[in-house]
Image (cartoon, rainbow, N blue to C red):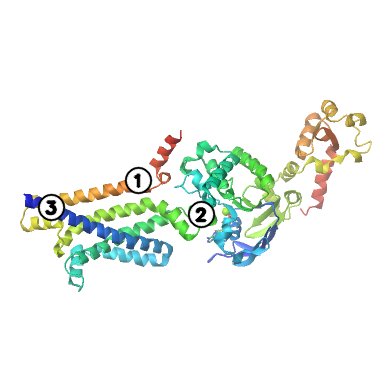
């Protein structure tokens, strides 16, 4: 039992670090990509089609393919790469959609008053697109947490291993324990992101915030 | 001074030019009002002046400088812009919205605070009340006023105002127009103002530019345009009560006969002694009004009291006489002089 719980902690931590690594890289890569295609519209179709395509490849085979590539091989590098590719679709799409959802008259007002492109991006488009971008980030994190279990087949020692062992040993309890732990991890991360989101999003952009503000002003 | 020189804009794939060969000059400190039917190119002209749209042909000069050679971002910071759709930043408070351009220009925090207070008072909103509100918590009229305040924030010498009072009811609109004219008396900004509403144009404009299908069809002072519409189109825009509009516009002092030029006969109704006795006697025995009042007010008094002339006063003295005949002959002369 002690041995077991020790292992569960190890698996959970491994799972968490994999998810965090992937999320970090994916954000650094796909948010700028989303911003770029919202600016250079002609690349948007192709980029999003690529994202969709990657998303449709069954995860097991994607992990498997990278495993055979020299320098990637069994283990974390292949896992990270595959998961980052999965994250492309929800992140790029939401960033693009978020930026496009910003009222063009607000952008035009900003430009008309002498804001530079960068100022418009930072001060208008990103803050107003945040709710949609953030929704994408939360979906991505939950998604990556789930798919990461499959990486156990290419050598990741994470919560997927519980499930894998459960399957090979026909041990339902083990499978369920693994599944629950993965869900808990996903929900926890989602909850934490929710807290961050509330801090980052202006009360002016949400109905609730507006009502709250109104009460305060009386 | 703003000078537009044979300005044209043809949007890609458009059937006809949005703006065609438009030339005009707006003097320093004047309000030039663009009026015309929807889609005639008013907004396009404004946006070419702050380079949100690049002209297909033609030039724009501001203070003799061709703006095609300027940095658009710097140019825009010197031009106040009230966008037709208001376009407040929903994620920023009223204070932050108004503070936008001063912040871009790196004003000190204190200077910005003071300026926002001044502007809120100027547009008739209580700073206490609205300072920390978000645009979503304001009424349409309040948002529109914040839009105007935002454009005025850095005290730009030039203002482009695209239907700035479009979204408010007639009473508030009237109030905002009055307020704006009052502050313009001090600001003396060069303003290009767009509206659908000919009444607003007549009221606000030192000059009116009437547009149709991308072309400037008439440009001049409101009274001249009302008196002499150059085409059926302009006459239609002015409405069938354009003489009445003119009566609202022209001040009694422009038509009155100054006292020293009054013949015995003209001042018939007013005995010399009474005239010299000034306002009080006139007030008692006759009807009078001030020099600044419109002809319409003079007619109103004459009709109500069954008179054919009124005294015109400045401060406490009678300075002239205005007769019914003066007004009717003025109007009929205009009609005869006009092309319609
Ligand atoms: N970005 C654009 N691309 C293509 N056509 C445009 C664009 N902007 C305006 N137009 C066209 O140019 C013409 C003039 O438009 P503009 O917005 O200047 O009209 P307007 O006089 O301001 O009308 P309104 O009173 O309705 O605001 C219209 O036919 C419009 O469809
Ligand atoms: Mg318009």
Circles 2 and 1 on the same chain: yes
Residue assigned mark 2: A110
Circles 3 and 2 on the same chain: yes
Q: Secondary structure at mark 3?
A: helix
Q: Is residue B56 left or right of residue B23?
A: left
Q: Secondary structure at mark 1?
A: helix
Q: Is residue A186 left or right of residue B246?
A: left
Label of residue A198 in the image: 1
Residue B105, image x, y percentages: 54, 54
The answer to whether the residue bearing label 2 lies less than 8 angstroms from the nearest atom of ligand 1 is no
* Mark 2 belongs to chain: A
Q: Is residue A17 left or right of residue A126?
A: left
Rendered residue at 42%/64% (across/down): A41
| Extreme-top residue of the structure | B284
Can residue B109 be seen? Answer: yes
Rendered residue at 29%/63% (across/down): A52
How many C-alpha atoms fall within 10 Å of the one at disc 3: few (<14), some, or many (≥20)?
many
The quarter of the rendering in which ligand 1 is drawn is bottom right
The residue nearer to you, when weighing B334 against A141, is: A141
Which quadrant of the structure image shows residue B75?
bottom right
How many C-alpha atoms fall within 10 Å of the one at disc 2: few (<14), some, or many (≥20)?
many
Residue B176, image x, y percentages: 61, 41
Rendered residue at 65%/56% (across/down): B211
Residue assigned mark 3: A8
Which quadrant of the structure image shows residue A168?
bottom left
Which of the marked residues, 3 or 1, is nearer the chain's N terminus? 3
């Amino acid at each position: 039992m002690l041995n077991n719980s020790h292992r569960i902690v190890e698996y959970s931590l491994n799972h968490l670090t994999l998810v965090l690594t992937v999320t970090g890289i994916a954000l650094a890569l796909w948010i700028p990509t989303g911003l770029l295609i919202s600016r250079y519209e002609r690349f948007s179709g192709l980029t999003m089609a690529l994202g969709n395509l990657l998303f449709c490849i069954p995860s097991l085979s994607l992990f498997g393919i990278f495993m055979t590539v020299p320098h990637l091989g069994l283990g974390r590098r292949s896992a990270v790469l595959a998961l980052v590719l999965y994250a492309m679709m929800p992140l790029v799409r939401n960033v693009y959609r978020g930026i496009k959802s910003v009222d063009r008259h607000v952008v035009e007002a900003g430009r008309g008053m002498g804001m530079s492109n960068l100022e418009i991006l930072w001060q208008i488009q990103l803050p107003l697109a945040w709710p949609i971008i953030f929704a994408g980030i939360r979906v991505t994190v939950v998604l990556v947490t789930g798919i990461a279990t499959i990486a156990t087949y290419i050598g990741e020692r994470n919560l997927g291993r519980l499930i894998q062992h459960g399957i090979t040993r026909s041990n339902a309890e083990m499978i369920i324990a693994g599944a629950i732990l993965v869900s808990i991890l996903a929900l926890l991360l989602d909850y934490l992101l929710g807290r961050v989101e509330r801090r980052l999003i202006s009360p002016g952009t949400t109905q609730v915030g507006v009502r709250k503000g109104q009460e305060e002003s009386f | 001074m703003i000078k537009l020189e044979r300005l044209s804009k043809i949007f890609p794939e458009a059937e006809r030019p949005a703006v065609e060969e438009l030339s005009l000059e707006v003097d320093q400190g004047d309000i030039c009002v663009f009026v015309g039917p929807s889609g005639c190119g008013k907004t396009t002209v404004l946006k070419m002046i702050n380079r949100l749209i690049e002209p297909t042909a033609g030039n724009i000069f501001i203070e003799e400088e061709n703006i095609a050679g300027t940095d658009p971002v710097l140019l825009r910071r010197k031009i106040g812009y009230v966008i037709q759709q208001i376009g407040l930043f929903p994620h920023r408070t009223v204070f932050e919205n108004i503070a936008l351009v001063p912040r871009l220009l790196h004003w000190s925090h204190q200077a910005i605070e003071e300026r926002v207070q001044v502007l809120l008072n100027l547009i008739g909103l209580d700073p206490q009340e609205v300072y920390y509100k978000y645009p979503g918590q304001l009424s349409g009229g309040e948002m529109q006023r914040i839009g105007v305040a935002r454009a005025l924030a850095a005290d730009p010498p030039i203002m482009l105002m695209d239907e700035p009072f479009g979204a408010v009811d007639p009473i508030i609109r009237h109030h905002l127009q009055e307020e704006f004219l009052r502050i313009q008396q001090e600001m003396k900004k060069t303003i290009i103002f767009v509206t659908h509403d000919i009444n607003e144009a007549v009221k606000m404009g030192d000059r009116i530019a009437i547009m149709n299908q991308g072309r400037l069809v008439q440009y001049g002072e409101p009274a001249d345009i009302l008196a002499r519409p150059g085409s059926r189109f302009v006459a239609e825009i002015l409405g069938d009560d354009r003489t009445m509009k003119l009566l609202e516009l022209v001040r009694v002092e422009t038509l009155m006969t100054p006292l020293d030029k009054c013949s015995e006969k003209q001042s018939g109704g007013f005995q010399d002694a009474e005239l010299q006795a000034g306002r009080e006697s006139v007030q008692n025995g006759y009807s009078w009004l001030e020099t600044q009042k419109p002809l319409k007010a003079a007619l109103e008094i004459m009709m109500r009291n069954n008179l054919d002339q009124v005294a015109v006063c400045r401060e406490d003295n009678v300075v002239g006489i205005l007769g019914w005949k003066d007004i009717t002959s003025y109007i009929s002369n205009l009609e005869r002089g006009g092309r319609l």
